[in-house]
Image: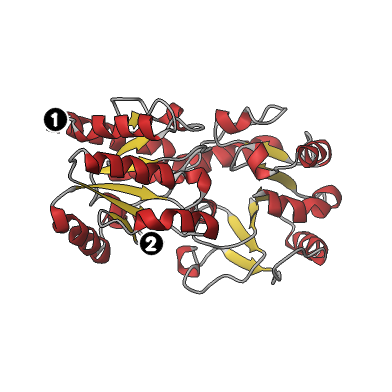
Amino acid sequence: MKIIEIMPIFELCGVTRFVTDLCNQFVERHEVVLIVFYPTPSSRQPELSSRVKLLELGKEPGLSPMLCQRLRTVLQQEKADVVHIHTASALQYAALAILTVRTSRYYYTLHSEAKFEIPSRLGRKLVECTLLRPGVCQTISPSAFVANSLSFATPLIPLGRDLREEQRVDATAAQQMADIRNRHNGQILLNVSNLTPVKNQLMLCRAVLELLEKGYNIELVLIGNAPDDAYFQKLMPLLRHERIHYIGARNKIPAYMVEADFFCLSSITESGPLVLIEAFFAGLIPICTPCGDVPNKIRHGDNGLCADDCSVRAYKAVLEEALNLPESRRRSMSEAAGQSYPAYSMESCAAQYIKLFQRHSA
């Protein structure tokens, strides 16, 4: 089977990690082409298997109407059995090909709630009526939470990650985390996500500061890009606190996770966070807000803890519960977190995609 994966940009984010892992898994048994719109930094390319054919369409910033025709031409030339699209932006530019190049079967994985992926209600209705119809382009949801945001039923395939034992070990990560821990010999809370309002780090920082005032010996480490300048400026006064450490974007996230005590997911909404899968892999106990699909993955008191809501009050309470856990409970919860990973491995995820692709080819 020949499979084309399409996403706009090869950047450090969850969708890119997922698509890279998916391509690398598919190429073990299938011919795979990855199409991206923007040039790919050379530092990012080694993550992609050399057996995956990478095509860059040379898009300039801003709206690019000619890209629709360019993408259509490439898809005609490549003659794939399956074209698998990620993000609403990629779907927009693939619309012409979807409607006119019918030699391939089209699939679109919705990575967020429909209202976030396509904010305009009229735009969503237009897309549903023209592109996301049976026999035109099959929509796939990573969770029931995402599926329920649509007006029609979709197959469910949970997102996966390809994580290996060697990713737990990185000398730079170990030294950086040790330097932070050794300052006050405190417990480390780790948040991994871009700094944006929906990820709710402002609430997380405030909850941590209140716990520090109560005498808890903790350090908060934040990893991720800061794409929203206005939000970053709001966070800046809190990030200057000696117990809050923003260290920017990092690779080898599991290596940072094995050096932490708890993983903090503070988001307002999530469809199927890959970083939670990484925490499971690292055996790091997650402390989460009850956002999106997260409560379906966290069994409170077993493989993690879940707050009552997304407020400072509720999250501070669940943090206190975590910090006061007896050592035996911590060990058992860490083991349960680790045992949760196999259900979200990329091997399992890719197998479900292939099964769907093959069923539709029959």
Spatial CA span between label 2 and label 1? 31 Å
**Local SS, label 1:** helix
Q: Position of residue 300 (x, y in %)?
A: 33, 25
Please state which amino acid type lies under the numbered disc 2: Arg
Q: As drawn, which residue projects farthest toward the bottom? A: 42
Task: Tell me, for residue 328, which label it has, or none.
Answer: 1
Q: Position of residue 257 (x, y in %)?
A: 29, 50
Say few, some or many: other residues with alpha carbon within 10 Å of mark 1 (under 14 / 14 to 19 / 20 or more). few
Say few, some or many: other residues with alpha carbon within 10 Å of mark 2 (under 14 / 14 to 19 / 20 or more). few
Please state which amino acid type lies under the numbered disc 1: Ser
**Local SS, label 2:** loop
Relative vertical location of residue 90 with respect to residue 46 in this rendering, above or below = above
Asked whether the viewer can see residue 41, the reply is: yes
Relative vertical location of residue 318 with respect to residue 174 in this rendering, above or below = above
Q: Which residue is mark 2?
A: 250
Q: As drawn, which residue projects farthest toward the right? A: 100
Looking at the picture, the colour scheme in use is secondary structure
Name the quadrant containing residue 168. bottom left
Which circle's residue, 2 or 1, is located before the other in the chain?
A: 2
Determine whether, in the image, residue 76 is placed left or right of residue 325. Answer: right
Name which residue lies at 83% across and 36% down.
129
Relative vertical location of residue 110 with respect to residue 245 in this rendering, above or below = above
Determine whether, in the image, residue 5 is placed left or right of residue 28. Answer: right
Name which residue lies at 57% across and 41% down.
353
Q: Nearer the viewer, residue 81 or 331?
A: 331
